[in-house]
Amino acid sequence: MTQLLLLTVALLVLAHVPPGRSEFKRCWKGQGICRTYCTRQESYMHLCPDASLCCLSYVFKPPRAPKNEYD
C-alpha cells in the first residue's frame, strides 16, 4: 500500500514538471531562441514579438550579401 501511495505522489509531481527547453521561445524559422542576452556563440538577428533578442548560432547565421560596387 505504501508503494502505491509513493508511486501516485511521484506521478502527480512529474505531471507538473514542464518538459525540457520549454522556457525558450523559438524564432528565425525555428533555428533561433528568444532571450534577454545572446551567448558568445550566438549572434543577434532581430527582435522577437515580446521585445527580446532572437539569438542565432553562428552555424545557422545566413551569409551576408555581397556589397554592390556602385553603392
Image: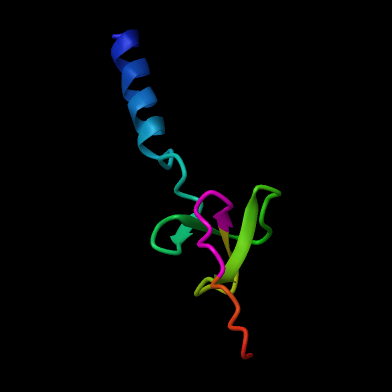
Q: Main secondary structure of the magenta part?
A: loop
Rendered position, 14 above or below 56: above
Along the line of sight, the residue nearer the viewer: 29 or 21: 29
Q: Position of residue 13 (x, y in %)?
A: 41, 32
Rendered position, 47 above or below 20: below
Residue 62 on the magenta segment? yes
The structure residue drawn at horizontal position 63% and vertical position 64%, both measured from the top left corner, is 44
Using residue 70 as the reference point, say whether residue 2 is left or right of it: left
Using residue 49 as the reference point, say whether residue 37 is left or right of it: right
Using residue 37 as the reference point, say whether residue 60 is left or right of it: left
Along the line of sight, the residue nearer the viewer: 26 or 61: 61
The structure residue drawn at horizontal position 33% and vertical position 27%, both measured from the top left corner, is 11
Q: Position of residue 24 (x, y in %)?
A: 50, 53
Q: Quadrant of residue 53?
A: bottom right
Using residue 19 as the reference point, say whether residue 48 is left or right of it: right
Rendered position, 17 above or below 33: above
Residue 5 on the magenta segment? no
Q: Which quadrant, please, contains the N terminus?
A: top left
Along the line of sight, the residue nearer the viewer: 54 or 9: 54
Looking at the image, which residue sits at the far front?
A: 69
Q: Position of residue 69 (x, y in %)?
A: 62, 84
The structure residue drawn at horizontal position 38% and vertical position 24%, both measured from the top left corner, is 10
Q: Which quadrant, please, contains the C terminus?
A: bottom right
The structure residue drawn at horizontal position 39% and vertical position 62%, both measured from the top left corner, is 29
What segment carries the magenta color? Answer: 56-64
Q: Quadrant of residue 7?
A: top left
Q: How is the image coloured?
A: rainbow
Rendered position, 40 above or below 5: below
